[in-house]
Amino acid sequence: MHISKTAKIVSNSIYAFGCVIFLALACFALFGASLVPYPDAMIPYSMRDYAVVGLAMGSIPFLFASMAVYKFNLIKQNLHKKRNFLLIFSPCFLCGICLLFIIGLIGFMLIKTMLRI
């Protein structure tokens, strides 16, 4: 099966852009300031919180980009399948962990609110 070069280049460039955004947001989430940029807001969030939300929002599109890179670069037919799979999908897994964390927080807060009534 012949894969077109255009699809490969587009998927690799989207994945590379996603990796750059992932690294920037991960650096903000780990090393960012805990100062609140908008202290007068109803629910003030720090830059770390914004970065975690950004990582969670990008998890699904990043999953599609990772799957496209895995398919169009023919990783299944490569010699080191497991290593390349882990390298390609590890940023996506970390974004998914942020998504699950936020879903867990929302669920915990809903349960906490329901038990208070």
Image (cartoon, rainbow, N blue to C red):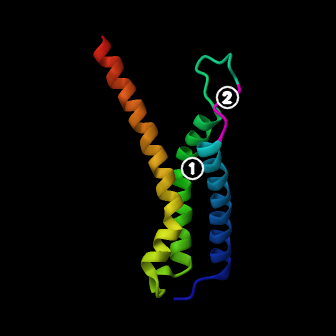
Q: Amino acid at mark 1?
A: Gly
Q: Is residue 63 visible?
A: no
The residue lying furthest to the right in this view is: 37
Q: Residue 58: which numbered mark, if any?
A: 1
Instruction: Report if residue 75 lies within the magenta region.
Output: no
From the viewer's perspective, is 113 left or right of 14?
left
**Which residue carries the number 2 mark?**
35
Identify the residue shown where x is 39% and y is 36%: 104
Dominant secondary structure of the magenta stretch?
loop
Relative to 94, residue 48 above or below: above
Tell me residue 24's x, y (percent). 67, 51
Q: Is residue 39 visible?
A: yes
Q: Alpha-carbon neighbours of circle 2 within 10 Å: few (<14), some, or many (≥20)?
A: few
Tell me residue 87's x, y (percent). 52, 70
Q: For this rendering, which residue is in front, 65 or 7?
A: 65
Identify the residue shown where x is 31% and y is 18%: 114
Relative to 88, residue 18 above or below: above
Tell me residue 58's x, y (percent). 57, 49
**Residue 48 in which image quadrant:** top right
Tell me residue 56's x, y (percent). 52, 45
Mark 1 and mark 2 lie on one chain; the one further toward the N terminus is 2
Identify the residue shown where x is 60% and y is 16%: 42
Q: Amino acid at mark 2?
A: Leu
Query: Mark 1 touching mark 2, by CB under 8 A?
Result: no
**Label 2: which secondary element:** loop
Q: For this rendering, which residue is in front, 42 or 5?
A: 42
Of tags 1 and 2, the one toward the viewer is 2
Q: In the rendered structure, which segment of residues is drawn in magenta?
A: 32-37
The C terminus - image quarter: top left
**Residue 72 in which image quadrant:** bottom right
